[in-house]
Image (tube, rainbow, N blue to C red):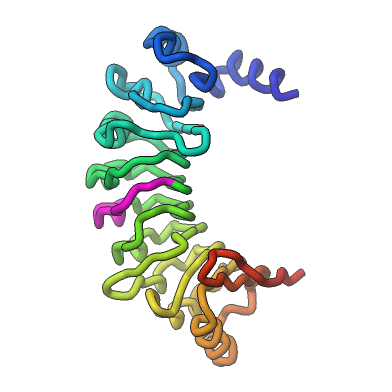
Amino acid sequence: MRDMCLRKAKEENFLQNVNFAHQNRTSVSSSMVTNATETVKVRRLAIYLNSNVDELVPLRNHKDSHLRSLLYFAPVNCILKDEKLVGSLVKNFRLLRVLKFEGMVTSGELPNEIGNMVHLRFLSLWRTQVTRLPSSLGKLICLQTLNLKFCDCNVIPNVIWKMEQLRHLYLPLYWTSHPKLRLSTIRNLQTLDHVSSLCSDLNDLSGLRNLRKLGIGGTSSLEKLEENLKSKSSTLDGIRSLYVHNLLGTKSGTEVT
């Protein structure tokens, strides 16, 4: 079934795949990328990487104005050797709607140019070692999903409030924000994971009428949430899943049906 779906997707130009997962370094050439990106106007490109990444193909030598979704699938502990490659990705594909960049080992910082990708709807840095998020992230006003789960960025710039279209926000395990992260303007938010009263004002949650899934960190946050639930002005009665994360990152909770 999978092979049939992939074949049909290729025939309809719905999705193109470039698989380097089982290729040796000498065979990872531009020819595979050329076949996948230049013969047709590719709008969705999935790239399967091997464990050592010298190049986030096709980013160095090819700019495709038609590309809208770029998905990277990396093995465990995939090493990104050149931190400048992320900058090339951001500069070359400003019209992307979807960018899935997960699981890569890099000591780099997310470049300021990420703010130029104003068409992004989905951005995932899940389990990456990106250490810093620039304040230009606040320019992504069309963003609907931001996944920073298990990301190494421990300081979140207080610009999330500008993303008024945001539906799903997954925060890192350990993070802080100065000043506290403002959430009151994100009224479309449906999922909020790993929020803490130490780093954000949980009073902001009272106005999030669409919130359905909530994950909070620590017992102090739980106590603050309980106060909000008892408030007459609270609109948190729409929550269906509530989880409490401990310091080890595991969670306990329940789902309301």
Is 234 left, or right, of 105 in this rendering? right
Which is more toward the observer, 25 or 251? 25
Query: Which residue is painted at 49% across and 58% down in the image?
Result: 170
Q: Answer above or below: position of 212 versus 39.
A: below
Q: Position of residue 60 (x, y in %)?
A: 28, 21
Q: Position of residue 238 (x, y in %)?
A: 64, 73
Q: Magenta stretch containing residue 133, yes or no? A: yes
Query: Which image quarter holds the N terminus?
Result: top right
Q: Answer above or below: position of 118 versus 29.
A: below
The residues colored magenta run 128-139
Residue 100 seen anywhere in this rendered image of the structure: yes
Query: Which image quarter holds the C terminus?
Result: bottom right
Which is more toward the observer, 237 or 62? 62
Query: Which residue is painted at 31% across and 52% down in the image?
Result: 131
Q: How many marks?
A: 0
Which is more toward the observer, 108 or 162? 108
Q: Answer above or below: position of 186 versus 71.
A: below
Q: Position of residue 44 (x, y in %)?
A: 49, 27
Q: Magenta stretch containing residue 13, yes or no? A: no
Which is more toward the observer, 209 or 158? 158
Query: Which residue is painted at 67% across and 70% down in the image?
Result: 240
- Quadrant in the rendering for residue 59: top left
Residue 16 seen anywhere in this rendered image of the structure: no
Q: Position of residue 24 (x, y in %)?
A: 46, 14
